[in-house]
Amino acid sequence: MAEQQKTIDLFVIGGGINGVGIARDAAGRGLSVVLAEMNDLASATSSASTKMFHGGLRYLEYFEVGLVRKALIEREILLSAMPHISWPMRFVLPYHKDMRFEGETPTSRLLSLVMPWMKGRRPAWLIRLGLFLYDHLGGRKVLPATRTVDLHNDPVGAPLQPKFAKAFEYSDCWVEDSRLVVLNARDAEQRGAEIRTRTKVVSAERVGDLWHITCQNPDGSHSMAKARMIVNSGGPWVGDIIRNVARVNSTEDVRLVRGSHIVTRKLFDHDEGYFFQGTDGRIIFVIPYETDFTLIGTTDKDHGSADTPPVCTQEEAEYLLDFASQYLKNPVTKEDIVWSYSGVRPLYDDGAANASAATRDYVLTVDTADGAPILNVFGGKITTYRKLAEHALAEIAPFFPGLPSDWTAGVALPGGDFPVLGVADLIAGLQKDYAFLTPFTAKRLVRAYGTEARKMLGEAKSLSDLGQDFGCGLSETEVRWLMDKEYATCAEDVVWRRSKLGLRLSSQQIESLDAWICAYAT
């Protein structure tokens, strides 16, 4: 067993958005950082979100104003740092008189006391008040404000049933979640961090004021590292890492909540999303997805074990289909589904009565009971990952005197060094200089790589200069980039996390890609 002699400052366990965000922030402050992820980056929760930077409008019903405000402030900060993988989106919230709370919330209890005839319902004035707060809590500057929509005379009303006459239209943001993780990892590496994928931490032992960490490497061998501090950002496995890897005596744990989504054929022709409220009090989003598809989600179901792979069950898929069909003019059926996915949210176990009410805010705890410190990360939202990292560094700072101050706000991720509203110009410029690209591919490359699309394409003058074509514009040049710079090691990494070309490529094309990757890797 080879032993790493150098003692590092921070060993981060987990390559989801929280882990890479902390690694990036810490490396940028001069700490020596190693991050180990047992699978691919963003292979669990961080690639299974609803793909949104948002404040969490419905969390206002639980009086989580601080969480919502924090997330709303972050939306525009994040937009400025990653305009290629994130962009503004308008959402349409149709109103009807039977909108209800799910279960009992602080807001519903208050309404029942002062207006008992409104028991269980979300009145229009309450929704409008919530949207007013949503517009103003975060100091909105770039995104447009809420407006009231006449659904019978606006294009966004065309896909809806005629019974819906009024809606509220508000702003949030889209984000390519798994690409966000990869770009944070790349930036962390460029600032000195070491990123190890397919590397599982099997044990961590306190020896004096250091951690001795044993890892299983991709080839099955073992290696050791010494670190002054561990960051446990294991997501659904955070509790397992506390108990079984670091063997820390703690009762803290996560509540695992499964969120499932379905992707269907394209259900409408405009680029706005929908926020639908059910008579059972739950909400779902129906969102334009990958140009030719529609994303519908999410559910909230308690999930038994982090080691049980989450899947969208038939019951959940039918629930989402029925829910959307209560609003859409043309019912959505199981024949419309082209893909589904599910992720487990590792929420801090606050004892909430139901999964939807469990807090989405994060909790950070530091344990130093038996020597070297370990920071445990519970919960969190993709929207607040950067703030979570800043708060994590505030917890880490006392163990590393003289640590520089916060620095990440507005600092561009790789490829994001252009104006928020500059995507169209970037696409046009790429098409002009690489005329052999189809409009679809030019847009996809800019949305994935931003200004780095040109670096990847280099001096290519024709499609043949990009090497083998694996289908849908995915070239050998791009796959080499993903393997050499973005940690991809198999076709699944490429077509489901670095892109969503798995929706378009055939199984034979994906098999051919996998074979090429295996040959290239050896």
Image: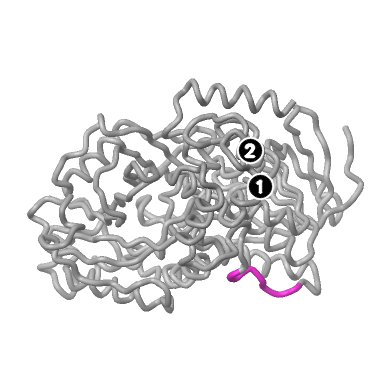
Residue drawn at the location 67% of the way across and 25% of the way down: 518
Determine whether, in the image, residue 97 is placed left or right of residue 409.
left
Q: Nearer the viewer, mark 1 or mark 2?
A: 1
Q: Which residues are magenta?
A: 404-410
Tell me: 304 left or right of 32: left
Q: Work out which quarter of the rendered image holds the N terminus and state it.
A: top right
Q: For the stretch drawn in magenta, what is the main secondary structure?
A: loop
Visible in this render: residue 39?
Answer: no
Q: Nearer the viewer, residue 207 or 153?
A: 153
Are there few (<14), some (14-19), or many (20+) residues within 10 Å of tag 2?
some
Residue most toward the left? 163
- Res 177 visible: yes
Dot 1 or dot 2: first in sequence order is 1
Query: Which one is in front, 177 or 439?
Result: 439
| Disc 1: which residue | 458
Q: Amino acid at mark 1?
A: Gly
Q: Image quadrant of residue 184?
A: bottom right
What residue is shown with label 2? 477
Numbered disc 2: secondary structure:
helix
Spot occupied by residue 9 in the image (x, y as percentages of width and height): 80, 58
Q: Helix, strand or loop at disc 1? A: loop
| Quadrant of the drawing holding the C terminus | top right
Whether residue 409 is in magenta: the answer is yes
Q: Residue at x 17, y 75 (%)?
A: 114
Q: Residue at x 24, y 47 (%)?
A: 268
On whether residue 271 falls in the magenta region, the answer is: no
Q: Circles 1 and 2: CB distance less than 8 Å?
A: yes
Viewer-proximal residue among 421 and 278: 421
387 vs 358: above or below:
below
Which percent across, then down, holds residue 105? 29, 62
- Residue 294 vs 28, above or below: the answer is above
